Amino acid sequence: MNTVTTWNQVYDPFGNAWLSTLAASLPVIALLGMIASGKVQAHIAAVLSLVLAFCVAVFLFGMPGDLALRASGYGVALGLFPIGWIILNVIFLYRLTVEKGWFATLQQSVAGITTDRRLQLLLVAFAFGAFFEGAGGFGTPVAVTGAILIGLGFSPLAASGLSLIANTAPVAYGALGAPIQGLASVTGYDPYILGAMIGRQLPFFSVLVPFWLIWVFAGFRGMLQIWPAIAVCGGSFALAQFGISNYVNPWIVDIGAALVSMGALVLFLKYWRPATIWTSPALRGNDPSIGYVTAAGGALPTPAGARTASSREILLAWVPWIILSVIVAIWGTKFFKDIVDPIFIWNYPVPGLHNVIMKVPPVVAKAHPEAAIFKFAYMSYTGTGVLFAALISGVIMGFSPWRLVKAYIETIWVLRYSLITIAAMLALGVLTRYAGVDATLGLAFAGTGILYPFFGTLLGWLGVALTGSDTASNVLFGGLQKITSEQLGLSGILMASANSSGGVMGKMIDAQSIVVASTATGYFGQEGKILRFVFWHSIVLACLVGGLVMLQAYVHPFSAMVIHP
């Protein structure tokens, strides 16, 4: 196969939008279908879907085979760095704390704040997870909170699914505002204005999601029993999210809102407790044999022979996670990246792919080449910061250098299939992007006329479901959202922001996040169960975001919230 000088993407290879859209959707349908069936292991499903995507790109969309191979290889590299690198090192740290017994002490300390499982979910999955989303993103919050929930006694399905549902409202501002910056780069809008507009959409769902989370876990009645705590947790987060995004900047929204939410909830719990304490970690209706053990104002029973940890032991148990939080927060700052990247970054333009593929109208206003530069920022990767945190914590915990090396090798072996899956998932996403297959799906949404505010929001949801990243979805469809909204007489800022806001609800069903969740909770091979658990929640919540955007587009007083260019 000969490398062409340039190749223009083709968005309607059959001359029929319906057939072209159907062809473009085949890899995604196959991937989700195989995972949901539970009969195909995730890493095999990912590889088979990648092969199918390659065939669709080459034989149906006319992409030269050598370009398809190069794009797939580029995607594999992006899957391992930075995403696989984060997961590997987070799980390495988690396994070290488990081996030394510090994680069990951490579990006991969280139970010391509240023995109610519903309140533990609010504190860990929602508030603590939002902090890690803001500091690191890219799977870090699901990996950390999933592992903590497992340590608290939640089932793997509950820990995985509930962590995914909780990790929605903060996503648009994740990794110190990376999705906002990506959206600004392709639309030309001021990132401060985009951040402010998103801050006029997501706070509604920052209030809703905690209620939704507890409803899923404990049922409607169980949710109502702790509604004041849920309102404090979600309401404080939403107010801080709106205030920081509209009056400070879009970079520190999640970190600030998460700290406010955690502080408000912990303070509130000093003066309020539910009349009935929910002590069972079982999902409501998931295992009828367990039942729902509750105790009026009581505490969790202490197992026979168990010893209560001292204050010093509890403090030490939190040290690895405090170190992780501090280092990840530093690693994500522009100040740190500006120092280390000029020295420790390797920019590698992918030969035969960089600037070879042309993205053309109507997806963009003017044809331009697609860059393909693998930025190997090995020092500023969040995963590198996590590794430093794990090594420092390992020394504090008393591990020998040899044991640390051996434990790291053991972690790689445990995660081998997960790393393969993540690499194949990203390869599929990158290939469909460079083949123009994802743009074909986007154009189908763009042709919905007056209903575009609703379907344009779902386009963001689809983008995150495809790529696993709100940042990638914004880069992918942000320009299309701007062009289409302007053609329809809508605010480009509204629809660009809706792409990011709608995308957050796709985070819980993207295959990459599901694999991260299954890895963190030891639920290997059960990715289909996780997908089936969260799928309808994702769709319903995305439709609710779309409904809000429709109101902001056409109905007063919601339309008064819209920022116009």
Image (cartoon, rainbow, N blue to C red):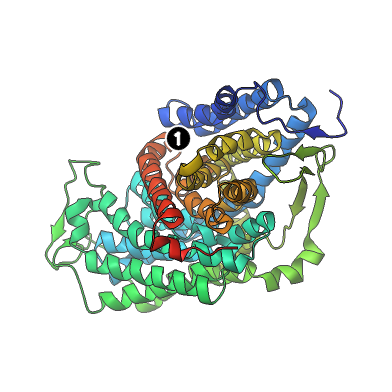
At x 52%, y 67%, the residue is 196
Q: Quadrant of residue 200?
A: bottom left
Q: Residues within 10 Å of mark 1 (few under 14, many from 20)?
A: some
**Observer-nearest residue: 183 or 505?**
183
Q: Position of residue 22 (x, y in %)?
A: 55, 25
Compared across the picture, whether 152 is left or right of 252 comes to left
Task: Name the kind of residue labelled 1 in the image.
Answer: Gly
Compared across the picture, whether 559 is left or right of 67 comes to left
**Observer-nearest residue: 98 or 153?**
153
Compared across the picture, whether 407 is left or right of 209 comes to right
Which residue bears the numbered disc 1? 525
At x 68%, y 46%, the residue is 78
Q: Position of residue 7 (x, y in %)?
A: 80, 32
Q: Position of residue 147 (x, y in %)?
A: 43, 54
Q: Quadrant of residue 208?
A: bottom left
Q: Quadrant of the N terminus?
A: top right
Q: Position of residue 448 (x, y in %)?
A: 50, 38
- Considering only vertical position in the picture, is 95 above or below 286? below
Compared across the picture, whether 439 is left or right of 321 comes to right
Q: Is residue 279 visible from the viewing direction of this image?
A: no
Q: Quadrant of residue 534?
A: top left
**Observer-nearest residue: 403 or 241?**
241
Give the residue furthest to the front: 489
Q: Is residue 63 visible from the viewing direction of this image?
A: yes
At x 63%, y 28%, the residue is 53
